[in-house]
């Protein structure tokens, strides 16, 4: 469905299409559903895994997991399946972004398999017992200072570490604060060290760009929010784990249908006359699912039977009707040329 109908897949940098994989706990507390357990968010629920493609956030793969399952458990198999599904949509270069919970060499081995095509990655490192002071000194010695407020130092640079028998690039972001944001002096300086494994070459992508690319990975939290709140999928309905897993898979289809409708409406809106354009306040790159549901799904209409035919009558002065008609024609023809019968105006 995404391959056939998606208007475009927006790259995050140059030709790299982002693939964000992350776990987002579903709060199902005060229930006795099968598989509900104590998640890392300190609530009882499930810990499903999701894979989103492109800046638009198309949901490529999802897997319902018990709440007590660690985020890395089963992730290599999930990544392999997600990359296979991704290759059914695009053959472009893929940039996989993972959190520190997935700092495991098994994931990198999946990315390096030739059958998955060109795949790069940014994985936040788990510092574990490493010295933050040593990382800060290395960043100061080999990195570049970034402009920031008084009382705060930020150094970004490259380092190399051996991993799985070969050297791999590590991007370091070292932050030292002597004053808080409100100007209060700190008794002891605060050190914050962020390090990232990456396959992106320094000649292609700078260290600062790698940090910004990982920060953009946080956009996937908005996709989680749309699933949980806009589609009301957080508290799954059944007491059986298999049934809830099926409901989540159905939610994947509904999520992509709404996402496609929202993105297609933006594309079609550019071809409308000024008086027919969507009544939105500012130009956006991606429409939230709640907005799509409220504006294009909850559209008042009337079911009419005339001349032995059923039709859907819409109010002709509805400001969303012109773009809704374009989207209807686009998806009603299955992406092919031609027109389908449109509902008459009411």
Image (cartoon, rainbow, N blue to C red):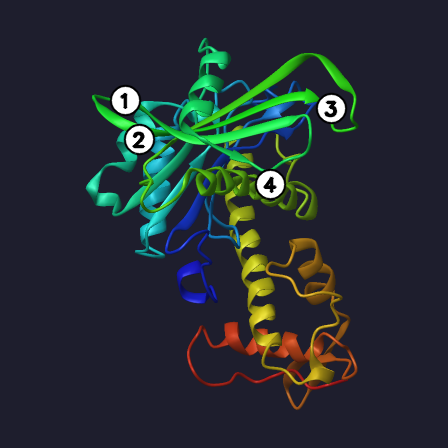
160 displayed left or right of 239: left
Residue 311: give x, y in percent of width and height. Answer: 66, 81
Depicted 189 relative to depicted 269: above or below: above
Q: Earlier in the sequence, mark 2 or mark 1?
A: 2
Location of the N terminus by quadrant is bottom left
Q: Are marks 2 and 1 in contact (CB under 8 Å)?
A: yes
Reading the image, the residue beneath label 3 is 180
Reading the image, the residue beneath label 2 is 108
41 displayed left or right of 72: right
Reading the image, the residue beneath label 1 is 163
- Closest to the camera, between mark 1 and mark 3, is 3
Residue 62 seen by the camera: no
27 displayed left or right of 84: right
The quarter of the displayed image where residue 40 is located: top right
User: Is disc 2 placed on a helix, strand or loop?
Assistant: helix
Which class describes the residues within 10 Å of circle 1: few (<14), some (14-19), or many (20+)?
few
Give the distance between the C-alpha atoms of the residues marked 4 and 2, in whole angstroms.
25 Å
Q: Earlier in the sequence, mark 1 or mark 3?
A: 1
- Closest to the camera, between mark 4 and mark 3, is 3
Reading the image, the residue beneath label 4 is 224
Q: Are marks 1 and 3 in contact (CB under 8 Å)?
A: no
């Amino acid at each position: 469905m995404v391959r056939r109908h998606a208007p475009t897949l927006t790259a995050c940098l140059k030709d790299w299409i982002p693939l964000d994989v992350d776990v987002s706990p579903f709060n199902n507390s005060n229930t006795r559903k099968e598989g509900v357990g104590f998640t890392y968010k300190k609530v009882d629920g499930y810990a499903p895994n999701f894979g989103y493609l492109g800046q638009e956030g198309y949901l490529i793969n999802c897997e319902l997991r018990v709440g007590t399952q660690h985020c890395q458990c089963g992730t290599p198999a999930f990544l392999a399946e997600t990359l296979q599904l991704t290759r059914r949509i695009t053959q472009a270069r893929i940039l996989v972004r993972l959190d520190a919970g997935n700092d495991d060499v098994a994931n990198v081995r999946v990315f390096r398999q030739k059958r998955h095509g060109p795949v790069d990655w940014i994985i936040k490192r788990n510092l574990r017992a490493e010295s933050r002071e040593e990382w800060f000194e290395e960043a100061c010695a080999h990195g570049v200072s970034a402009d920031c407020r008084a009382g705060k130092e930020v150094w970004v640079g490259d380092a190399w570490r051996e991993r799985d028998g070969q050297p791999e690039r590590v991007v370091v972001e070292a932050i030292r604060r002597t004053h808080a944001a409100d100007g209060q002096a700190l008794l002891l300086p605060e050190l914050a060290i962020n390090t990232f494994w990456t396959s992106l070459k320094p000649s292609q992508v700078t260290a600062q760009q790698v940090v910004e690319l990982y920060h953009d990975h946080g956009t996937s939290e908005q996709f989680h929010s749309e699933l949980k709140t806009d589609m009301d999928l957080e508290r799954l309905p059944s007491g059986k784990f298999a049934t809830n897993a099926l409901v989540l898979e159905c939610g994947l289809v509904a999520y992509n249908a709404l996402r496609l409708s929202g993105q297609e409406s933006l594309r079609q809106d550019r071809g409308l006359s000024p008086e027919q354009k969507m009544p939105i306040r500012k130009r956006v790159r991606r429409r939230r699912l709640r907005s799509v549901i409220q504006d294009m799904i909850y559209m008042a209409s009337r079911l009419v039977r005339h001349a032995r035919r059923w039709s859907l009558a819409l109010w002709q002065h509805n400001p969303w009707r012109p773009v809704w008609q374009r989207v209807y024609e686009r998806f009603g023809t299955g992406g092919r040329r031609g027109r389908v019968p449109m509902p008459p105006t009411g």
